[in-house]
Image (cartoon, rainbow, N blue to C red):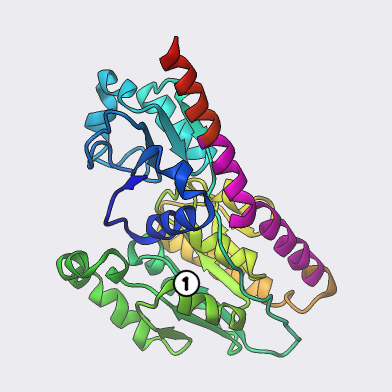
Amino acid sequence: MTINPTPKGGTELQLEYLTQYVDLQLLSKVQITTSVPEKIPLHSSKMNILWQKNSYDQPNLAPWFKDKSNHNKYDWYVFNSHWCAEKFRMAFELPPEKCVVIKNAIEKFADKPIHKNGDKIKLIYTSTPWRGLSVLLGAMQLIKDPLIELDVYSSTQIYGDAFKNANDDSYQALYEQAKKLPNVNYIGYASNEKIMKKMGEYKIFAYPNIWEETSCMSAIEALGSGLHGIVTNYGALFETCSEWPTYVQYDRDYKNLARCFAYAIEGIASQLHSVGMQKLLNSQVSFYKKFYSWENRKNEWTNFLQGAYDSKSRTNLV
């Protein structure tokens, strides 16, 4: 398999898992490009697949997709959510017979945290700064419960040194705000491995998302590890998080969104120790381990790739 040599963030993790879990001989029969069409040349003899993880409204994607003569350049378009697939099909009239959804997955989840009444309630934010950190910091300023505390793992470093050097200065004021709040600990960049090792220390995944997610790896990691999610109902989050989290209605008035988020955090914090909440979280963990593990996802990829390859081989013989 030929793949983009410098994938970023969650895409990098998914590519690593793909090569770990799916037969390499099968992968060698295809060329997978991630997100940006033709960033690596189309292969003349292999099946070409575009694994689309970016949103339909990204300015670097629209010109290529608007030109319908490009659509047949790829044998298949694989999307990480039904939301993402439908947005692309509606925006660019992609042929539906070329589109398939194979969701993201996780290799290993953290152990579910145990919460007792009176314990410190630690929240975690693990996304880039532009996806809702300002709203969450606004919410934390409104929270008065001394047991509620937020750790922020957020930086542009996840996209590499060049991206960080070009963009991180824009968020320094936000980082400084986080450092000054008494109930917030700004940690900055941490590897996915380190975050997953620490995940069991947290009780709530707090994500007032204001950026349309096409899937959300951080939500899968957190909810699959037994954290209760408090998220906005924006983009593909409802599909990824299903019925498990507490949803806060997305609001373009970010001050109002922060107020609603603070209210939701304090409300959930008072319920975490209840038997009903713990039963819900146990069921949630079982759900994610069943539907979002790479042990199961590898079968979807194997069946899809083998079937697509066999179909193309038969077509070429005709």
Residue labelled with disc 1 = 125
Seen in the picture, residue 11 relative to 200 is either above or below; the reply is: above
**In the rendering, at what x and y percent does residue 119 appear?**
68, 89
Q: For residue 13, what is the image quadrant? A: bottom left
87 left or right of 289? left
**In the rendering, at what x and y percent does residue 7 appear?**
31, 56
* Residue type of the residue flagged with mark 1: Tyr
**In the rendering, at what x and y percent does residue 33 appear?**
33, 42
Seen in the picture, residue 179 relative to 287 is either above or below; the reply is: below
In this view, the residue farthest toward the right is 275
**In the rendering, at what x and y percent does residue 134 appear?**
37, 68
Quarter of the figure that contains the N terminus? top left
Nearer to us in this view, 311 or 294? 311
Q: Secondary structure at mark 1?
A: strand
Q: Please tell me whether residue 19 belongs to the stretch shown in magenta.
A: no
The residue lying at 72 percent from left, 82 percent from top is 115
Stretch of the chain drawn in magenta = 278-305
The residue lying at 54 percent from left, 82 percent from top is 198
Quarter of the figure that contains the C terminus? top left
Seen in the picture, residue 162 relative to 24 is either above or below; the reply is: below
Seen in the picture, residue 104 relative to 312 is either above or below; the reply is: below
